Amino acid sequence: MKQFRVNIWEQGEYTYPAAYGFLPNIRTYLHEDAQVRPAMLVVPGGGYCMVCPHEGEIIAKEFYERGMNAFVLTYTTDITMSVPLKRQPMEDLSRALRLIRKNSEAYGVDPERLAICGFSAGGHVCASVCTHFADIIEENPAYAPFSNRPDAAILSYPVITSGKYTHQPSMDALMGYDPSGEEKEYYCLEKQVTEQTPPCFLWQTAEDGLVPVENSYLFAESLKAHGVPFAHYVFPYGGHGLSLASEAFFLGKHGEPYTFEQLNLALEQIRNHTALNVSERRYAELTEQFFGEPAQDAPAAPTELNPYPDVRMWPELADLWLKKVLGKK
């Protein structure tokens, strides 16, 4: 397996003010052969405040083992919730898609079989690009010839709406605490689906207590109304953030935590009280959360290593679906 990091923005292109030295990047999981393969770009969640490792490497390796060349995107987030992200995560994903297509020969990737897989807020990033890809104008002539439209998307317990069933902290980090009505409408993604939206596979649990399952229903209904091919699975049991729902996941074997790079840089600024535009209240919250005394009682280990065997089936279902919508070559 060929693994390496590629920064997706070139010198002078990336200007997000609360990056603290971070540069958005992809990590590769490539087969060491000459076969041209479909590709999967994984976009972890984290409420637009961080990029969670448990939805990164283990997901990429799952699709690698299923014959794809895989990538993980570490995109822009803001744990301080002080500098609204606006279009930056969507810009990050768009550039990553163009970069992979630009380097498709070197990566052993079929540029016409490039899928994305987003989790929670990462699902919102993916669905944003699926619905608004035409809005992201590429100014760098090296990347402008390449499309940022995914060929398919897997949306795993995604944040979709900015309306009644939203995950409000994600929307606050994305748009700020006082967005305009026009901006809220733009990121209310069930209202932004068109006939050009790529095929989507959605899955979620009915018991999700963080991102209501209605998010998936709203998007599936809109996909159907616009004639976009889709699959939609709702599993009856399990909470938010189940990732693979595998034994390794429940044992905490989530892979390398490289997606925490920007989080760690921001926390160093919090520790030094030098972060940008952070209120005293948010300083106090983050200091308590990350630098306070650890909880006395550690969380109990799961009594079963595979308590949701039905949820564990989603990669197999998604793989079968991808073979149909991407085709075999």
Image: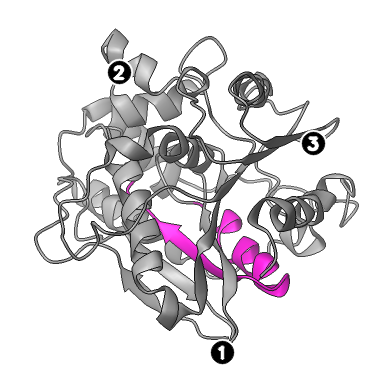
What residue would you read off at disc 2?
183
Identity of the residue drawn at 52% across and 59% down = 114
x and y percent of residue 157 in the render? 64, 36
Residue 298 is situated, as x and y percent measured from the top left of the image, at: 68, 50
| 53 relative to 7, above or below | above
Q: Pick whichever of labels 2 and 1 is earlier in the sequence.
A: 1
Identify which residue, 134 or 42, lies in the foreground.
134
User: At which x and y percent is residue 143?
Assistant: 24, 61
Q: CA distance from mark 3 to mark 1?
A: 40 Å
Residue named by callout 3: 238
Q: Residue furthest front?
A: 329
Q: Is residue 282 left or right of residue 105?
A: left
Left or right: 150 in relation to 1: left
How many angstroms separate mark 3 from mark 2 (CA)? 32 Å
Q: Earlier in the sequence, mark 3 or mark 2?
A: 2
Query: Residue at the location (41% across, 40% down)?
Result: 129
Q: Nearer the viewer, residue 139 or 288?
A: 139
Please tell me which of labels 3 and 1 falls first in the chain: 1
Residue type at mark 1? Ala
**Residue at numbered disc 1:** 34
For the record, the magenta segment spans 52-79
Depth-wise, is mark 2 or mark 1 nearer the camera? 1
Residue shown at 73% from the left, 53% from the top = 324
| Residue occupying image coordinates x 69% and y 73% | 67
249 inside magenta stretch: no
Residue 284 lies in quadrant: top left
Dot 2: what SS? helix
Q: Which part of the image, by quadrant, shows the C terminus? A: bottom right
